[in-house]
Image: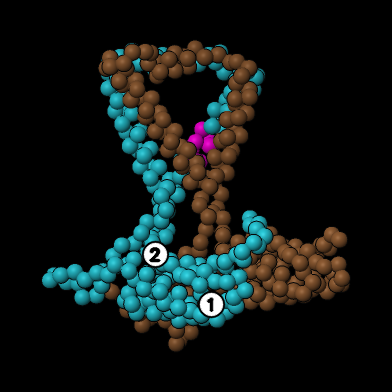
Chain colours: A cyan, B brown
Amino acid sequence: MTRTAVALDRLAALLIGVLLIVLGAGALVWNTDLFSDTPEAITAPAFTTATTEPWWGWAMAGAGVILLVVGLRWLLSHSPAQRAKTLRLDGTDRTGTLSADMGAVADGVAAALAGIAGVQSAKGKAIIDRGLTTLDFSLSVGVDQDLGPVVTEIDEVAAQVPRITGDPGIAVRCRIHAERRPGGHADRVE
Amino acid sequence: MSTASTGHVRSTESAAEKAPDTHTVSPAAGRRPVAAAAAGFCGVVLALCLMGIGVVALRDAILAAGWIEGSLWTANTAGWIDGLTFSTWMIPAGIGCVLLGLGFLWCAVKPRRKIAVALGAHSAVWIGTSDLARIATAAAQSVPGVLRAQTDATPSKLTVTAITMTGRDGSSIIEDVSQSVHDALTAVDSPPKVRVRGKRAKR
């Protein structure tokens, strides 16, 4: 999810939350003496009349299409982090473009990480994480593995990335996973 | 385009992004892993509601065009709202609306949950809270006298429950387990608090 999508979700949740609280509070105080000018009944003559107009069907068609498209687009914004595809390299000019496949760069670095002593496997992908182009790696180690030497070697591999990409602005993130022992008890995480 | 020789680290998180020494070139640090935002769930629900309303609108449009028979649901809704007076069902419905609204408000402002802690590295190296729990459990189980162990973990606290043999002194086992877990977590930049509870195995 992009930061824009998260911000939109938060804003929508805020607005709907306030609307529901106002509606609920209105229903609760309707039949009380807290407010002197509460109406006996709700009236919506304009709404009722509008539904009988000949243009109502067209309005519903337009609104239906817009709501479906907006809803679908909103739903699709909840997909996982967007992949970073290509990296523009130095040397690009009017005569041509030089670019690198970010996925291939991630695979190459992951292969180097997989070669670290104690690392059982490593996978990499290039993503745009909250606006930051990131090479994201997932490394598996044994649960008894001493992490200190592994981290030192990860630093050495990560230090190669700016030289490979030519862009120190491309972020690197490694996540270490400790593999559970077969038959081990499940731990609880909050 | 900037070059790699600057050794610059873009700082977005405090723990994992230490300034590199003069001999180390570090890439920019990736952002801290976090769980999906609670508001994302609300977003999915609201998007589905929006699409549902859209389907109702299209159904009424088709009905208005005369392609199907029936009554307009939007007209029925308008007729129901117009002239609506207070009814007792509005009390529980109002309470439900307020509670649901508070839930939406909570989701809107709730920060994304941290699911990993930083390891002491120049680059951004993280380990998941669940992985820390596994490491702590393994460390506890490596102590002589511990039959099995289980760990409850948050990014700031690990609670290790060790089931111990009846033959050994309980307090010394707990000290050993605590030491073993601390030793296993030395690579963590800011190790979580570790609490060890000992339980005697049933005979």
Residue A125 shows which numbered tag?
2
Residue type highlighted by circle 1: Gly
The residue that appears at 43% across and 70% down in the rendered structure is: A172
Neighbourhood count class around disc 2 (C-alpha, 10 Å): few under 14, some 14–19, many 20 upward: many
Q: Position of residue B91 (x, y in %)?
A: 63, 22
What mark, if any, has residue A118 been given in the picture? Answer: 1
**Depth check, front residue: A140 or A167:** A140
Label 1 resides on the chain identified as A
Q: Quadrant of residue A86?
A: bottom left
Task: Please indicate whether residue B33 sits to the left or right of residue B198 in the image.
Answer: left
Residue occupying the point 40% across, 28% down: B53
Q: Position of residue A33 (x, y in %)?
A: 65, 19
Q: Quadrant of residue A35?
A: top right
* Of residues B37 and A174, the one drawn nearer to the viewer in this rendering: A174
Q: Secondary structure at mark 1?
A: loop
Q: Chain of mark 2?
A: A
Q: Are dots 2 and 1 on a single chain? A: yes
- Predominant SS along the magenta part: helix
Q: Residue at x 36, y 77 (%)?
A: A162
Query: Residue visible at 34% across and 66% down?
Result: A103
Q: Is residue A16 magenta?
A: yes
Q: Is residue A51 above or below residue B138?
A: above
Horizontal arrangement in the rendering, residue B117 relative to residue A62 (left or right): right
Q: Nearer the viewer, residue B157 or A153?
A: A153
Q: What's the magenta region? A: A13-19
Quarter-of-image position of residue B51:
top left
Q: Looking at the image, tell me whether mark 2 or mark 1 is earlier in sequence order.
A: 1
In front of the other: label 2 or label 1? 1
Q: Is B186 displayed left or right of A137 in the figure?
A: right
Q: How much space separates mark 2 and mark 1, taking CA atoms?
A: 21 Å
